Image: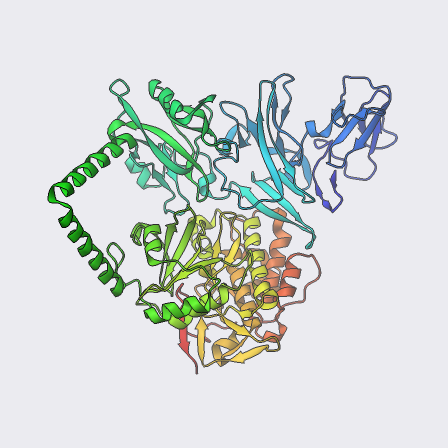
Amino acid sequence: MWYRISSSTVIWVANREIPINSTSGVLKLTTSGTLNIFRNTSDLTPIWSSNASFSVQNPVAELRENGNFVIREENDDNPVSFFWQSFDHPTDTLFSGMKLGKNFVTGQEWYLSCWKNSDDPAQGEYTYRLDPTGYPHNVIMKGQNLTFQTGAWNGVRFSGRPKSSGNTMYTHKVVINKEEVYYMFEQINSSVSRLMINQSGKGQRWTWLQQAQKWSILYEVPSDNCDNYNICGAYGDCNINNGPVCGCLEKFVPIDVDAWTKGDWGSGCTRKKPLDCQKGDGFRKYSHIKEPDTLSTWIDERINLKECKKSCLRNCSCMAYASLNISKGETGCLQWFGDLKDIREVSEGGADLFIRVAFSDSDREKNKATFIISLSVVGGVCLLGLPLAFCIWKIIKKKSKLKRSKGILQGSPKGILRGSSKEHSNMSQKEDPDLPYFSLTTLLHATNNFANSNKIGQGGFGPVFKGILEDGQQVAVKCLSETSTQGTNEFMNEVKFIAKLQHRNLVRLLGYCTDEENKMLIYEYMPNKSLDWHIFNEFRNKLLDWPKRFHIIDGIARGLLYLHQDSRLRIVHRDLKASNILLDVKMDAKISDFGTARSFRENETTASTNQLAGTFGYMPPEYALDGILSVKSDVFSFGVLALETVCGKRNREFIHSDHLQHLSGHAWRLHREGRTLELVHQNISQESDYALEMIRTIHIALLCVQQSREERPDMATVVLMLGSNGELPMPSQPGFFTEGNIVGSDADDNTLLEGR
């Protein structure tokens, strides 16, 4: 069975264990209502049968519009009255209206199982199912081993999944009653979505793009290393933004410190202070986390969160509690017993989990200490008198104003903030009335005074800090530092361009700040950092399979196409490189850093410049040597970036024992010799199902890095080539084929050079 819109997308196979490799197969419906499949018309032994234990007087086999293949009574118009249905026998794909779960009355279980390989639909080693043990949650199993779990269902979503942002394609739900438990999603309007388990053990959500006539992946799980089941052990806390990713929850320490320091986190963590249930324990709140495995849990839908706490506190075996359903406020009670396993931090969404700790480490004790200190302070103020308190307030206010005027505030790192005058600040607000303005006070509060613990990056512009606004939205605050190689022009250039650009593959600018001497840009927060953080790290590079890499390459291409052709301004980025590609929670590529971008008039195709902006290794020869700029400059950079993404090595740092070419030269040499796949990173070179797509992607990248800019395709052609299987022209010699044509650094910081 397949979609009419995509005949190559098989979603259900009846005889998956005994496939027929020709068109001779025969499907028959018997007079009693049994479906049989035969190898051919002369073979009377069925290789597959529906094995129906019923008898139908006038049976009809019907493929319904929702994809359900059913056997029903011919004159029965009941839309759910079927004697047999394919929905009860899923293969590797779940689509709208299908169940994932178990019927406790009949023993029927609905689960997905992957194909053995791309050519063999027989059941593979991975399954995707709803586990009804404890409190229901979806899991991925490799044989009998758990590899991923979604976290508990909270009435809105599974706690391990990010908060949905305006999903209009489908709704989903979990139904739990005495007879059955199941997960189901339903499509909205005319959208087409499917959930599947592939041969690599990835659960993938796909949607059909009608205009592009292709499938697009919305997300997949496991999506990163923290999704691997219980990677940090009991009470371990996995944070993909940390290195290493595993740490212990606050108030917990590693059980085996020596193993922990060597990257072996399986032993997990334990409480700093032991529990003492008889004398009294307490609870500590942990927010934005994926709830632990619910294998040993207990629920009560009737009580609220306050009563849930009391119930858990009375039971010395209860280790944690949380709200059962957040769709109706914080209602219901979910309690955990035994060690808490498979906890991770979730960038957006997650759950509030209250874990049992010693009373002195609990929130109650913390609140008690805060109350005592506050009471003492208030009492002291009263004794000293209101006049003295007023004087102290005036002094503090005066000092705060003085520090702000210098651009260095208490608690913020010295020397990171530098900006234009207050006059320039007022001018900026008038020039960009549609772009939200953030006060410095708001950003100080969001970033905890630009604490070093919130620093998430450093570029040519300056440091970048993670912040959380009052409404809970996570942001990235990019500060212009005193040591920056860029200045006011680049700052205003970024505001000017990116504020007017809206595309799913461009990073979104939320606002800016030019408060007195400080200049900052506020962006949407990207939890998976930048592309270079993944592909140029030996460990993290191994976590990127080919579908993720291709998805990233395709996203960059689509973002550039928008800049070059579809945006209101025709933009040449000029500094496209791995560190300027950010990745969101779904690993969607987002082009960032428009400080050196250049706009072109509608009829303008090239320009000359006396000041080069960009990074060596990504610059095309005509730009690096002669200052000639065009949209083909970005095409060249894209080609280099695509090659780096495929093999996980930097273009200019690439070294080969047999020759002196850069990465692009080495790729061209391999391609001419018919050894293209040798360029692919060894961790994904074994993914044979994607071999042709890998070769084609490298071929397209080589077309983009050709010496002559006239021979390079434009981005519209690149996007078309990536999404089709048509014949490709042979690439000619790439730019800078011989090592040593140009001297420079391929560092992450922008390289601004004086022209020749």
Q: Residue furthest left?
A: 384
Q: Is residue 290 above or below residue 755?
A: above
Left-right relation of 612 to 210: left
The quadrant holding residue 314 is top left
Image quarter where the C terminus lies is: bottom left
Q: Nearer the viewer, residue 131 or 593?
A: 593
Q: Is residue 615 shown to the viewer in this render?
A: no
Q: Is residue 10 above or below residue 734?
A: above
Place of residue 185 in the rendered image (x, y in percent of width and height, measured from the top left)? 62, 35
Left-right relation of 523 to 442: right
Residue sitting at x 11%, y 41%: 383
Place of residue 732 in the rendered image (x, y in percent of width and height, measured from the top left)? 61, 71
Q: Nearer the viewer, residue 263 or 178?
A: 178
Place of residue 426 in the rendered image (x, y in percent of width and height, measured from the top left)? 38, 68
Q: Is residue 71 above or below residue 382?
A: above
Q: Residue furthest bottom?
A: 756
Left-right relation of 118 to 656: right
Left-right relation of 690 to 599: right
The quadrant holding residue 87 is top right
Q: Is residue 379 shown to the viewer in this render?
A: yes
Image quarter where the N terminus lies is: top right
Q: Nearer the viewer, residue 14 or 411?
A: 411
Place of residue 124 in the rendered image (x, y in percent of width and height, measured from the top left)? 62, 34
The quadrant holding residue 399 is bottom left
Q: How many marks?
A: 0
Give the color scheme: rainbow, by chain, secondary structure or one colour: rainbow
Residue sitting at x 50%, y 43%: 223
